[in-house]
Image (cartoon, grey):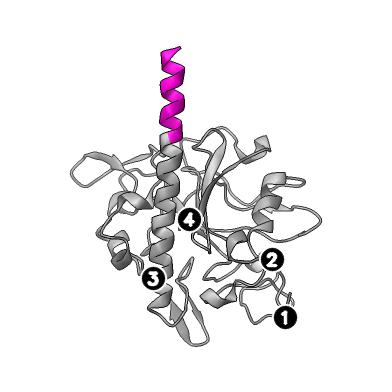
């Protein structure tokens, strides 16, 4: 009886720690915007209105296909170059869910934790997603890309997720795509897979600064883990989990 109780307590502690990390990352995200005229860091690097929007990760691209790839372990080359790094209290630990035990091999041959488990919504900071109708926020027939703190009018800051823990066999560039095709009637495609480190649940943080652990309902959202990088952009109709992410991502421009 003791072992199950300990396992449950450990899982609960991981969940609390995960939410704390998400909240600290959201503070860094908020401070960056406040110091940059309300402008948000990009989910990926891109140019908007002749202004270069920086990549929040510092440029890392994670992969399970090569554990020795510096993208997987080199905080100096990537995390420390993130525009959010000056606001992180010099802590690399908050970039990773404590329940993600994925490792890499550094240039000394040492086994070390991978540098992050988080990715950022493609609709927050941009550049959006072409398959959903628009890459740019000024497109009248597309979906809103939030580029400033004051943009979060619909669905609102408390209902718009910014960061999510992504599965270790899905995570790569830190740019988590939610394809809005079909919304609000149906789901079409799951581009990236969220993590399920907390008993089939994942850590999310929202534009108002709060964090939560969200439980997945559809088994297709949590397939068996691959040892190498997973194929992405998968057809995914009638998926309640994907619909939930769509509901907490963006809305049509002008609505």
Please say if 38 is above or below 123.
below
**Vertically, is 200 above or below 167?**
above
Judged by depth in the image, the label closer to the viewer, 1 or 2, is 1
Between the residue at mark 4 and the residue at mark 1, the CA separation in whole angstroms equals 27 Å
* Nearest to the observer: residue 120 or residue 133: 120
Between 203 and 78, the residue placed more toward the observer is: 203
- Earlier along the polypeptide chain: callout 3 or callout 1? 3
Task: State the residue at coordinates (74%, 74%).
Answer: 255
Between the C-alphas of marks 3 and 1, the distance is 30 Å
Q: What span is in magenta?
A: 1-12
Label 2 with label 3: CB-CB less than 8 Å = no
On whether residue 183 falls in the magenta region, the answer is no
Q: Secondary structure at mark 1?
A: loop
Q: Which residue is mark 3?
A: 31
Q: Which residue is mark 4?
A: 119
Q: Residue at horizontal 57%, vertical 51%?
A: 192
Most frequent secondary structure within the magenta stretch:
helix
Q: Is residue 64 visible?
A: no
Residue corresponding to mark 1: 140
Earlier along the polypeptide chain: callout 2 or callout 3?
3
Q: For the point 30% across and 45% down, which residue is it? A: 68
Q: Which mark is residue 132?
A: 2
Q: Earlier in the sequence, mark 1 or mark 2?
A: 2
Compare marks 2 and 4 and give the one earlier in the sequence.
4
Of badges 3 and 1, the one in the foreground is 3
């Amino acid at each position: 009886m003791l072992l199950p109780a300990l396992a449950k307590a450990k899982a609960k502690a991981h969940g609390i720690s995960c939410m704390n990390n998400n909240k600290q990352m959201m503070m860094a995200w908020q401070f960056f915007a406040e110091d940059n005229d309300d402008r948000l860091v990009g989910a990926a690097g891109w140019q908007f209105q002749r202004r270069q929007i920086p990549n929040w990760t510092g440029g890392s691209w994670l992969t399970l296909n090569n554990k020795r790839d510096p993208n997987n372990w080199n905080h100096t080359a990537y995390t420390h170059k993130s525009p959010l790094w000056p606001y992180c209290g010099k802590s690399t630990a908050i970039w990773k869910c404590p329940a993600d035990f994925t490792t890499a091999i550094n240039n000394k041959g040492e086994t070390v934790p991978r540098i992050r488990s988080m990715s950022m919504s493609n609709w927050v900071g941009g550049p959006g997603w072409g398959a959903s109708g628009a890459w740019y926020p000024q497109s009248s027939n597309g979906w809103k890309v939030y580029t400033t703190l004051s943009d979060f009018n619909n669905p609102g800051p408390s209902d718009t997720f910014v960061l999510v823990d992504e599965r270790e066999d899905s995570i790569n560039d830190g740019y988590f795509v939610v394809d809005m095709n079909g919304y609000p009637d149906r789901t079409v495609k799951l581009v990236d897979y969220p993590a399920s480190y907390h008993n089939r649940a994942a850590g999310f943080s929202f534009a108002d600064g709060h964090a939560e652990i969200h439980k997945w309902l559809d088994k297709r959202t949590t397939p068996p883990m691959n040892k190498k990088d997973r194929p992405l952009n998968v057809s995914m109709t009638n998926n309640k989990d994907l619909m939930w992410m769509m509901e907490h991502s963006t809305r049509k421009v002008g609505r």
